[in-house]
Amino acid sequence: MPVASCFFSQNFVYLCNQMDEILKYFPHLTAEQQERFAALDALYRDWNAKINLISRKDIDALYTHHVLHSLAIARQIQFKAGSRILDLGTGGGFPGIPLAILFPECQFRLIDGTGKKIRVVQDVAEKLQLNNVEAIHRRGEEEKDLFHFVVSRAVMPLPDLVKLVRKNISREQINPLPNGIICLKGGDLQAELQPFRKNAEALEIHQWFKDTWFKQKYVIYLPL
């Protein structure tokens, strides 16, 4: 749904306010990107009524708690065209779907071990005509292909994630940052990051996005 068509939506005020929040931090979105971001609200509300994908409290904060949270990765890195990114344990499509909208010239594979969640991702990607998204019902252990980066959102402790996806990191380098893991995590991460203290970088999202919800939430980057 185009941003201009918010007038035809019952959620006009809410949706336009949420899109204003996205545009405040990402002002150079194309019209097509704006349309795709605006369409997420109706798509996820419809699916949430069927399978309780997101909590009722969170569905009303979709753009802050899920979309903008996912886009924090874009403050860490601007993926170069041709980058291949694996979203491990994507759930309902986060962070993969928002990143795929933002980086249309990159290829995203979104995998999850829960079939009904992948059906949601497949439907959302199809309705948004995201030709750069491949959504597959697959566990991380089963994924064999190579990617420039693996992204995730609070899927598992970092040491476990490293063991699981090290096999999937390509040696081909095309981005300013060396290939590796970029994940979204929150809380006290000192113990979790201890084994990687020499290489891991933890950046607080609140420095970029000023909503208080982002305090003590981090983008973790670990080159592999």
Image: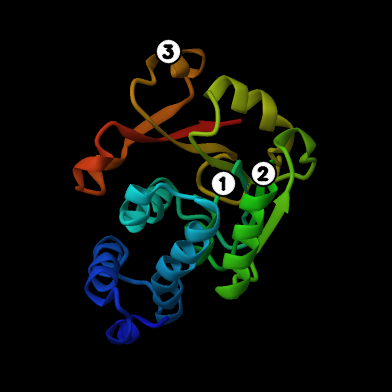
114 or 64, nearer to the observer: 114
11 or 184, nearer to the observer: 11
Quarter in which the N terminus is drawn:
bottom left
- For residue 202, the mark is none
- Residue drawn at (29%, 70%), measured in percent from left and top? 15
Farthest-out residue, front: 50
Residue labelled with disc 1? 91
| Residue 109 place in picture, x, y as percent | 66, 53
Q: Amino acid at mark 2?
A: Thr
Query: Is residue 114 shown above or below 102?
Result: above
Q: Is residue 221 visible?
A: yes
- Residue drawn at (40%, 47%), measured in percent from left and top? 55
Q: Amino acid at mark 3?
A: Ala
| Residue 36 place in picture, x, y as percent | 46, 73
- For residue 114, the mark is 2
CB within 8 Å, label 2 to label 1: yes
| Residue 166 place in picture, x, y as percent | 68, 30
Q: Amino acid at mark 1?
A: Gly
- For residue 191, the mark is 3
CB within 8 Å, label 3 to label 2: no
